[in-house]
Amino acid sequence: MMPFMTSKDLLAEPVPFFVSCSNTTTEANKTGSWRFLQPRYARKTAPCSAACPAGEDIARVEMLACKGRLEEAVQIILRENPFPSVCGRVCFHPCEGVCNRGKFDEPVSVRQIERFLGDKALESGKNHTPVAARSNGKRVAVLGGGPAGLSAGYFFVQLGFECELFEAAAEPGGLLRWGIPRYRLPEDVLREEIRRIERLGLVIHCRSPFSEEDLKELQKRWDALFLACGHGCGIRLGIPGEAYADDGLAFLSRVRSGSLLPMTGKAAVIGGGNTAVDVARSLRRFGLDPVIVYRRTRRDMPAFAHEVAMAVDEGVELMELTAPLSIIEEPGGLLLNLQKMRVSDRRFDGRSRVIPDGGRVETLRVQKVFTAIGAVPAHAWQVPPKDRNRILTLSHCTLVDGETPMVFGGDLNNIRKSVADAVASGKQAAMALDTLFHKGRAAIQDRLAPCRLGDGPALSMEIFTGGRRKENHPHVVSYEDLNPDYFEPSPRAAPGILAVEKRVEGFAEVESTLAAPAAALEAGRCFNCGTCNDCDNCRLFCPEMAVTVENLRQIDLQYCKGCGICVVECPRCAMVLQEETA
Amino acid sequence: MRQVMEGSHAVSEAVRLARVQVVSAYPITPQTHIVEALSEFCAEGAMNARFICVESEHSAMAAVIGACTAGVRAFTATSSHGLALMHELLHWASAARLPIVMAEVNRALGPGWNIWMDQTDSLAQRDTGWIQLYCEDGQEVLDTTLQAFRLAENVHLPVMVVLDAFFLSHTHEPVNLPSQDEVDRFLPPFLPRITLDVENPYALNQMSPPNVYMEMRHNIQAAMEQVPGRFDLVDKEFSSIFGRSYGSVETVCCDDANTVLVVSGTAAGTCRHVISQLRLRGEKVGMLKIKMFRPFPADRVRSVLGNVEKVAVVDRNFSFGASGIFAQELRAALCALDQRPQIFGYIAGLGGRDVTTETFEEIYLRTRQSDRPESESIWVGLSSKEREP
């Protein structure tokens, strides 16, 4: 019989209690023996990098920038592109068009961050790039001081070439110096970035134009030549009275050199590219009333949409679906006869095809007409030859083999005429010639192929020179590869824009550089596709505590059972899960 | 202090007074008011507790399991589909011997989609190792919640405090709200038997091979067997402080009754009234209210019903392919007796249908007029034609 208990006594008696509990560790349980799949840290290619002609390691740059590691971020950019401040202002930023964040809220403002970092680098006055490696004993001459020639020189000296650059104009920079107005790209920014290339060892000779005969002389004196003479000659309209029209590029050049005669009144600018818009916006700043006359519609204009929008804001008039027929001189100005056009159909890429709209014609009375419908090379010898036996055609340059190898690059060669493509051209030329001299022509394609980022043409100098990036997985990270549960919507950084009234008063820069906190915030919006940013998810989620973080993250294979949780929880696809190999 | 409050808030107030340290819950009608009030208590500082928001009831139960394993008093509340989603972790909580308290608002499971009162949700969890206590009114639900913590922490088993959807959860009644001092006298701080300790790390609830698993299961039952006795003591202590007690079962007019109606939940209130009316007419009828369903107080039930002629069990639930679940339990409890009453199983008030005084009178009269039940389950108040699609 149970002894009598008061309620308190019985409640104080413990009930039977048996749970499994062990104070030994689970170290003896080598769960790694269960594994047949193995997770690995694997940096992959972000879509922005694959789309960037200069092949910048954007995901890594943003990761460093967001953590305030600006010096490193700058160094990473400068490995691939000598012009972050320039590109941060004028690049057409294809990176942003393919940004995975665009599928989430708005793309990261990669260009604004590049500009911020480029300006920081200039402020520091440092080179940020190792000075030329030991000389490789080869001497190369660069003809043309535009972005392609300057980039080629930048990469040549880094690969150990002795390199000198010859520029016809009074100052290097090419289109950057003479074709893009100051309100988009101030001289000091360009000059400082060129100065940095000179500090690395590139010798620049200005006012050094060359003829076809001089070229033969150069071939004797140098081991190789790089030609990037650009498109020096504006395309003609081919209409009666064209002689009364001024060339748009020549006008922009005169604006930059300060040798412009005073003008007033109304001006017509014929064309729809960036040059046409630059001419119109510059004219506006001189107090003229510019009208852009374009044969297709506004959405077909090759000019950047935001530049067109700013031009319209500044009071530039836009005449769409209008083509010039003739220019007639009149007392006090010019009479422009115009044919109205209409859209007949659309091309596969969405651009309109236009045809004359019956007999609809108009006239426009102006003081000046400018043409900006494109440009062509000034001389035939500047164009890469078509002789298939002697040439090697690469994505951004053409190598002509011979006693003195010649590489043609820049706008002379590139299908897309952009600064970033010019940089790509110089980089590819440096890689091609380096390979040619070290391993021979036959080795070039094989040597360059692994330097490609994703499936695009962009090449990485970091990979070429054996940097960390060479370990990267070529897979281009798609939005579906990411784990967006870990991201929160946030607005894209907007740069400061000068008020319209201030803009048209002069040539002050329209857009301002992001302030440091805004730049860090914007860099933090980057998903860092394929790049580990130490978010620690893999370690936090690992059920076996098999992720260790000392200097770098590692997986302890004694305990990793291959469950793959780390790979799934990695927000940015910086890991892979692979079948265990015996 | 006597005040008018909703049944849901009687739970919330009890949880506040119990000085619960972690609340984790996912809202579901008709449980929402309980956790809404708790989240406000946590936000206002009326409770010194963490409210952990989760994305599902499965996670809510996982969170309170974690909290309780770490040695703090934890509470959650749910209903119907939410409880069903917790099923896996209900087993975990009891086998890990965690004294979690959960308010479970009886609601029907869909489809047909139905948010109203039905006991099948909680009764479907009868084999998970949780103590189940059913409540009749607002006062009982407040008192039972306080008792639940005391009981759970004494026997190291989780307790489900069960209340009817809307009839109780959303009905305002006068309720005596005890003072914090009184509650503190009744309910000491939680002293875990075993708890996670970063200073002295060990693993809990790891692999238990066949040579121990069966003993661990037997051990849970050994603790369960002590529950009715210990609940009586807890109830007695509660009574000494608050002046109210409930018992694992309650009998009304059963001493000389030849017919006893067996009920649970708010239907007991209606049934009480019917019993008093029938008694006035000289009917020898009584009522057995079952408060504790798990562990099933079979001894008490046997001692009350052993000498009764007929028993009418009113089930607001159904086990398809069998019968009403309270009826099953009663049959199992009484079949060991040499002489057993006739057991009539009635199914009534599913999915929120009212169980009225007329319902009970009909049940009583049918039982009185039949020698034996016409079938294992008698469905009360079905409309004459079932709808065909």
Image: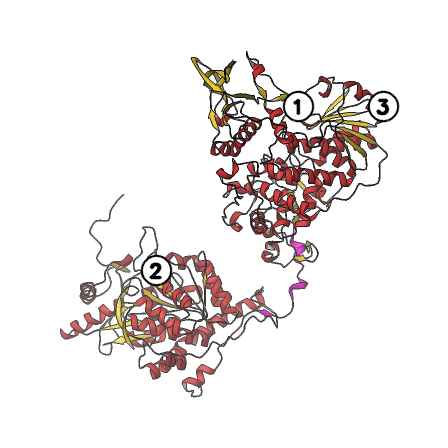
| Quadrant housing the C terminus of chain B | top left
Which is nearer the eye, B288 or A369? A369
Query: Does label 3 or label 1 sit earlier along the sequence?
Result: 3
Pointers 1 and 2 in contact (CB under 8 A)? Answer: no
Along the line of sight, which residue is nearer the eye, A484 or B183?
Answer: A484
Q: Callout 1: helix, strand or loop?
A: loop
Residue B353 as seen in the image, left or right of residue A178: left
Vertical order, A332 against B112 (above or below): above
Real-space Cα separation, disc 1 to disc 2, in angstroms: 83 Å
State the residue at coordinates (35%, 83%): B241
x and y, in percent, of residue A233 in the image: 65, 20
Q: How crowded is mark 3: few (under 14 residues within 10 Å), some or many (20 or more)?
A: few
Left or right: B304 as drawn, with respect to A161:
left
Residue A107 appears in the figure: yes
Reading the image, the residue beneath label 2 is: B120
Residue bounds of the magenta highlight: A17-38
Question: How many tags in the picture?
Answer: 3
- Colour pattern of the rendering: secondary structure
* Residue placed under numbered mark 1 in the picture: A231
The residue indicated by pointer 3 is A220
> Helix, strand, or loop for circle 2?
helix
Residue type for callout 1: His
Which mark, residue A564?
Answer: none
